[in-house]
Image: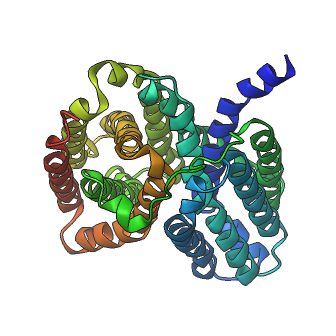
Amino acid sequence: MQSSLLERLRLPALVVGVFLIGANSFVLGPILGDVARTLEAEPVAVTRAISAFGAAAAFSAFFLSGLIDRYPMRAVLAAAAALIAAGFAGSAASPVWQALAFFQGLAGLATGVLLPAVYSQAVRSAPRGEGARSFGIVLSGWSLSLIVGVPLSAMLSDVLDWRIAYGALAALALLTSLVFALTGDSERPQAGGKVFSRREAISVPGVASLLVAGLLFMTVFYGTYALLGLRIRETLGIGAAAASLAVMAYGFGFGVGGAMARHVDRVGPARLFPFLLAGSGLLYLLLYPATEAYWTSLAVTFLLGIFNHFGLNLTVLLLAERKPAARGTLIGLNTTATYIAVFFGPLLMSTVYAGIGFGAVSLCGGALLAVCVGLMWRLRRA
């Protein structure tokens, strides 16, 4: 009875694992001014903590995610969640911005292992033929971080102190680490079998195309997301609170995508993927005219949330199915690509925006998604 109860906690723990990473990824932006005042630093200096998190996550995902294929999932998940808890606790106690950057870097190191480990455990635990549905539930952690985590953290910062937000995340991460230690798979993934190197994993047919498609897909998302609020505020003359509803609309759409994921399993993820990418590309093309009005802005960001859920879900799911024996390494490489996109996407799109305008950003997004469609078309029968 006790064992059955613990097993039921595994899926919620995986959702919380994604929530923790999402909350940390997005929480610093809204409270940047509060943090800077407390640490007696310029806001630009505090943003280096965000850069430290992203860089450490990319480094960790590339060099350390292979641990997922070598050690029991229980140990990897519990250790990574404990490390991210230490990063959150250190962030809460930071006296200067340099300390905050250090502890955010520590959280990034944990994220580079925790995120692919959560994804790998979710795919591995999914019943046969229900991969997209089960993985979609786990991905709902991103929606929760946008809809609940970020607004709640901002409220705690306003009413109490921003340190309380990081303290709460640290406590939740410690609890999650305990659940992982009790419910994660205890056997070694590759006991007695071959452990694949990154080079061998990339050489698996279809993997390079999936990684490139994932990189382009996330580059478009992060690049456009960074400018969307600015575009809406400049075009419609609204405040930050009204513009933030577009982020919430995206989060709700992402959650709806998770609820619809079971239909993907019926059709076949590889067959459906290029069509979903094409739909996503069309939405990016529509962003420019849609953001001329407030309600159409909310509608198109909601739809983008749905399609972006499928983009992330199917990229990871198809990568995991390419070579199950190298699942952790493959998902880690995709996580590396994601955090490269976190850096490169805003850099690319902001340059386009400054030089030509948001219409060019919208067009660039549609064009890059068209490349993704081409890359995935030949995998549709897989």
Residue drawn at 80 percent across, 38 percent down: 182
In front of the other: 3 or 34:
3
How has the structure been colored for display? rainbow
Relative horizontal placement of residue 189, taking residue 217 as reference (left or right)? right
In front of the other: 19 or 330:
330
Identity of the residue furthest to the front in this view:
192
Residue drawn at 18 percent across, 40 percent down: 278
Residue 103: % across, % down: 73, 72
Relative horizontal placement of residue 215, taking residue 371 as reference (left or right)? right
Relative horizontal placement of residue 97, taking residue 331 as reference (left or right)? right
Residue 68: % across, % down: 59, 54
Q: Quadrant of the C terminus?
A: top left
Residue drawn at 64 percent across, 76 percent down: 46
Q: Is residue 238 above or below residue 346?
A: above
- Picture mark count: 0
Residue 233: % across, % down: 39, 54
Q: Is residue 313 above or below residue 155?
A: above
**Which quadrant would residue 19 be assigned to in this image?**
top right
Q: Quadrant of the N terminus?
A: top right
Residue drawn at 60 percent across, 60 percent down: 67
Residue 116: % across, % down: 54, 52
Q: Is residue 98 visible?
A: yes
Q: Is residue 243 visible?
A: no
In front of the other: 224 or 126:
126
In front of the other: 238 or 194:
194
